[in-house]
Image (tube, rainbow, N blue to C red):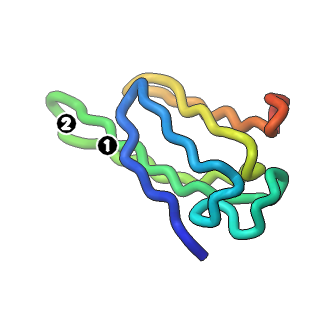
Amino acid sequence: YSAFKKDISPGEKECCHYTNIDCNLFKNRMDSVRLHVCLIITRINDGHEITRFSVTLPAGGWVVVDGDKDHHTVAVKYPDGARY
């Protein structure tokens, strides 16, 4: 399999189209893909906090990670925008 690897800063976004074999071998937007996410939060007095998790989603869908240094949320969407 291939890998799509990006460092994404707060406020930025990245995309890997479902027809790109680096993201989806079979090029079907409803195929399941897994993203491995690593959040690195810098705390002034406490150094860095690292949170890792995986998210499964349809290849044509998307993930939104939102929040602040104390709490984050993850929303996963189908290609039509419905909640996964």
Give the image location of residue 18, x and y in percent: 70, 53
Q: Gap between marks 2 and 1, in whole Å?
A: 8 Å
Residue located farthest toward the bottom when viewing the structure as drawn? 1
Give the image location of residue 24, x and y in percent: 68, 62
Residue located farthest toward the left when viewing the structure as drawn? 45
Q: How many marks?
A: 2
Give the amino acid at mark 1: Glu
Q: Nearer the viewer, residue 1 or 41?
A: 1
Question: Are circles 2 and 1 on residues that touch, CB within 8 Å?
Answer: yes
Identify the residue shown where x is 64% and y is 51%.
55
Residue 74 vertical placement versus 31 (above, below): above
Q: Which quadrant of the structure image shows residue 19?
A: bottom right
Identify the residue shown where x is 19% and y is 36%.
46
Which numbered disc covers residue 27? none
Find disc 1 in the rendering and name its residue: 49
Q: Secondary structure at mark 1?
A: strand
Which numbered disc covers residue 46? 2
The reply, left or right, for residue 16 in relation to residue 80 is left
Give the amino acid at mark 2: Asp
The reply, left or right, for residue 48 in relation to residue 21 is left
Identify the residue shown where x is 56% and y is 43%.
15
Residue 70 vertical placement versus 79 (above, below): above
Q: Nearer the viewer, residue 6 or 70?
A: 6
Give the image location of residue 51, x and y in percent: 43, 47
Q: Residues within 10 Å of mark 2 (few under 14, many from 20)?
A: few
